Image (tube, coloured by chain):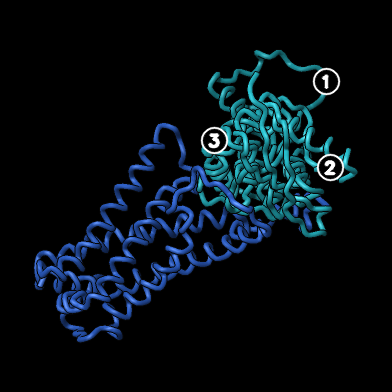
Amino acid sequence: MSKHLNLTLHVWRQKNAKCDGKFVEYPAENISPDMSFLEMLDVVNEGLIRKGEEPITFDHDCREGICGTCSMVINGRPHGPRERTTTCQLHMRSFKDGDSITLEPWRAEAFPVIKDLMVDRGAFDRIIAAGGFISVPTGSPQDANALPIPKQSADLSMDAAACIGCGACVAACPNASAMLFVSAKISHLGHLPQGQPERHIRVRDMIAQMDAEEFGTCTNHGECEAACPKGIKMENIARMNRDFIKASLTYRPATSGGGVG
Amino acid sequence: MSVAEQSIAGAEARGHGFLASSVGRKVVMAATGVILFGFVTVHMLGNLTSYMGAEAMNHYAEFLHTMIHGMGIWVFRAVLLTAVGLHIWAATTLTLDNMAARPVGYRNQKNIASTWASRTMRWSGVILAAFIVYHLLHLTTGTVHPNFDRANPYANFVNGFKVPAAAAFYIVAQLCLGLHMWHGVWSCTQSFGLAHPRYDSLRRNFATGLTVLVVGVNISYPIAVLTGFIH
């Protein structure tokens, strides 16, 4: 049996987007090193509820590292100290007895705090709605081998599609830029033939929405890539820039009368 | 809170121009940056004539002032001034956007991947802007030069660097140029979308190599004057 941990948490408490927040100190006692970080917070919250205090609000869902819901900055790093690990997959064995842990929400104008550590990431949904899709007729799917796709394109597309939209890139970026997220979504469609018809309009629309959401802009620090729990590469940002330059140089307004015959 | 909260910007936002968009301004930053680091490289090479003596350098200066019937230097000046103006405009608007994008900061953000150079771009840029003004007043117009002689650029060069404070400012400015170029040269390839695993190390090495060359040679000028190697 490994030794249980006693920790001190400094947690950002904020009632809602309009109120100012502040750090509050909480002890986390008798924590098993085998707990996940979120389970540790559950234990702390049970204690708070028993004392009649407001529990700490935080986002979580699948708790198996694939949904992208858990979001908090742990000691200055989104999702905590381990590489390629979401908060839910972070275990307390990554900490030492007596550690002091600072917990903050993702901090960005585009991600307003809902409560405590929970932020509204609706901006990401609106960026997807602006162009992160392909338009296909419904009906039964065609044979998988009807459309040849090079293995490497499929692999690169899947690498980009690994993005779970958690927002750690925005949280880690000194400029609160969303370009790693947006570029991952653009790349995962851009590598495939199905993504080609809307490729140029997609990059313009998604970037326009990204700007409208008031995210910052990339200055090539590389913090996003280091923080990404899914290992999304900055090469995607370059691909997005390339697509945007091409799309802007060749842009023409929607043609009318096409297909009238 | 942004307008976007309520709706998808869509068609009308798409009309928002290249220069208004974040990526568009990054491209302007990168393109003007290429002009500027191209210029400092040529400037560094041209000044190598100082090692060849007064005649070579004065002859080179005369060439710059008389090429294309004296028009050449004004074309260069116009291009450089435009590039500097656009570079500063893009940097200022993007920086303001970036500051607005995170109104509440972290208690202690851990930097893992960023470099000191990348985090100090705006400061090295401001120092460089101040240096350019000083440099022009010093060796182009002679306003702040102790004994400026329009007919003898070589003497201005040597006498200018004999003042230790001036030489020190040049050296500090060159170190800022080094930080700015090292991140900027690499960064502009990223903004142009020129990324590929095959060339990733080349991009980094090119930035390092060009920076060391330009800054190293430029710093050698005031040092050569102060040590009496150029006199």
Question: To which residue does mark 1 refer?
Answer: A139
The colour applied to the residues of chain A in this rendering is cyan
User: Is disc 1 on the same chain as disc 2?
Assistant: yes
Percent across and percent down for residue B186 are: 41, 47
User: Is disc 3 on the same chain as disc 1?
Assistant: yes
Subunit bearing disc 2 = A
Query: Sequence-wise, which precedes: disc 1 or disc 3?
Result: 1
**Residue B163 to residue B212: above or below:** below
Q: CA distance from mark 2 to mark 1?
A: 47 Å
| Residue name at image x 81 percent, y 48 percent | A115
Subunit bearing disc 1 = A
Question: To which residue does mark 2 refer?
Answer: A55
Q: CA distance from mark 2 to mark 3?
A: 36 Å
Looking at the image, residue B151 sits to the left or right of residue B166; the answer is left
| Residue name at image x 46 percent, y 53 percent | B118
Percent across and percent down for residue A142 are: 73, 16
The secondary structure type at the circle numbered 2 is: loop
